[in-house]
Image (cartoon, rainbow, N blue to C red):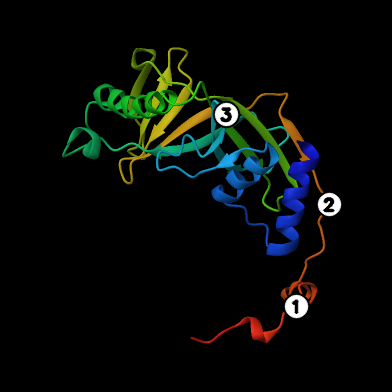
Amino acid sequence: MAINLGKEIIYLLSTRGTPRLEGNDWEEMFARIINATWKPSNVGLDDIVHEQTAWSAKTVKNNSPATVSKIRLISGRNSPVYSFGDQKVSKRDPKNLGNKILSIWNERVAAVRKSYQHLRTVVLIKSNNLLELSVFEFDTVMYPTVDYWWQWNEQQNLEGYNKLDQHIFTWQPHGSQFTIVEDVPKDRLSIRIKQPPIISKGDVLEKIKFNESWIEIL
């Protein structure tokens, strides 16, 4: 896993020229590494499939991928307006609204679990230059609404806490973005890679023996 991940990132840096890795890039990489099928889904919970297991693949930027202890994962758009027909959500009763936010997530997870025996999330934590990376994965679970309480914060975003008063969820009324705070395990896979040389467009075209006759003007 470590070698294959490093090879994927080095290839990306050499050919792209900039340390830019988007969500779809990571989905494709992970699928290739584990010899699975990449099939982007609208739900975003089963983008990679291998036999009876499906993964959601997410990326997070952090200056210290090997040592960070908590990260925030953007986990979709949970809209009470769309799902429940609510006309106004700002400054609503936080408990009632928070329960609706979680129920939207739980229904998505339950629907995907009907098709697969295992549902997982795999996370790539990346430095800004992509030279340090960490990977970990965990079961994608549903969250019982009775286990959490909610409040509005100073930015007028809704925050969810567990019974130990630990911040677990954030929901933004503008855009309906739902974020989950995850603990990063100490036994994550962490690697550091060497900055590779950049392959120019001219080098690639020369390597493949490009000829202008390949281009037909219609």
Q: Nearer the viewer, residue 146 or 40?
A: 40
Mark 3 and mark 2: Cα distance apart in space: 35 Å
Q: Nearer the viewer, residue 176 or 3?
A: 3
192 horizontally vs 104: left or right: right
Q: Which residue is mark 3?
A: 51
Crowd class of label 1 (few under 14; some 14 to 19; many from 20; radius 10 Å): few
Q: Secondary structure at mark 2?
A: loop
Mark 3 and mark 1: Cα distance apart in space: 41 Å
Residue depicted at 62% across the width and 41% down the height? 31
132 horizontally vs 53: left or right: right
186 horizontally vs 215: left or right: right
Residue depicted at 62% across the width and 37% down the height? 36
Q: Nearer the viewer, mark 2 or mark 1?
A: 1
Q: Which residue is mark 2?
A: 194
Earlier along the polypeptide chain: callout 2 or callout 1?
2
Is any part of residue 173 visible from this angle? yes
Mark linked to residue 63: none
